[in-house]
Image (cartoon, rainbow, N blue to C red):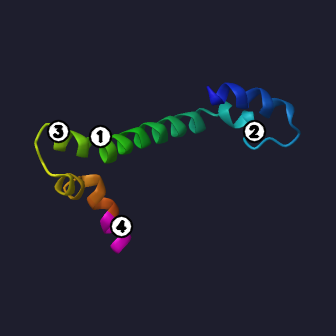
Amino acid sequence: MLIALVIPVERRVAAPVLPLLTLTSRTVVIASLIGFIANVAMFGLLVYLPTYLQVVDGVSATLSGIGNPGCQNLLRSRVA
């Protein structure tokens, strides 16, 4: 919905934040879609997987957070 508001404004201003011509490039569009899908997957891993582990598997909140592979990767990257 926000994109529907941004596009008309970006067309009218003299110096747009995101030039709309960049969205005509197939490479930019595909890279943006891949990034969007990767972010949705990461969000699901970090948010919904611990909840699933708690509700379905009966794991404690601490273990569901620490045992989450996404959280383990984030912790490793912060420590290293």
Q: Which residue is under mark 1?
A: 48
**Mark 1 or mark 2, earlier in chain:** 2
> Please, what is the three-letter code of the amino acid marked with disc 2?
Pro
Q: Which callout, 2 or 4, points at the residue further toward the start of the chain?
A: 2
Q: Image quadrant of residue 52? A: top left
**Highlighted magenta segment, given as a residue range:** 75-80
Q: Residue at x 59, y 38 (%)?
A: 28
Q: Amino acid at mark 3?
A: Val
Q: What percent of the width, then of the height, locates residue 64?
A: 20, 51
Tags 2 and 3 touching, CB below 8 Å? no
| 3 or 1: mark nearer the eye | 3
Tag 1 or tag 3, which sits nearer the N-term? Answer: 1
Kindly identify the residue that appears in the image at 24 percent across and 54 percent down.
Answer: 65
Q: CA distance from mark 3 to mark 4?
A: 28 Å
Mark 1 or 2, which is nearer the eye? 1
- Ranked by sequence position, the earlier of labels 2 and 3 is 2
Identify the mark at residue 18; answer none if there is no mark: none
**Which mark is drawn over residue 77?**
4
Secondary structure state at the residue bearing disc 1:
helix
The type of residue carrying mark 4 is Ser
Residue position for label 3: 55
Which one is closest to the eye, mark 2 or mark 3? 3
Crowdedness near tag 1: few (<14), some (14–19) or many (≥20) residues, C-alpha within 10 Å: few
Mark 3 and 4 residues: CB-CB less than 8 Å, in contact?
no
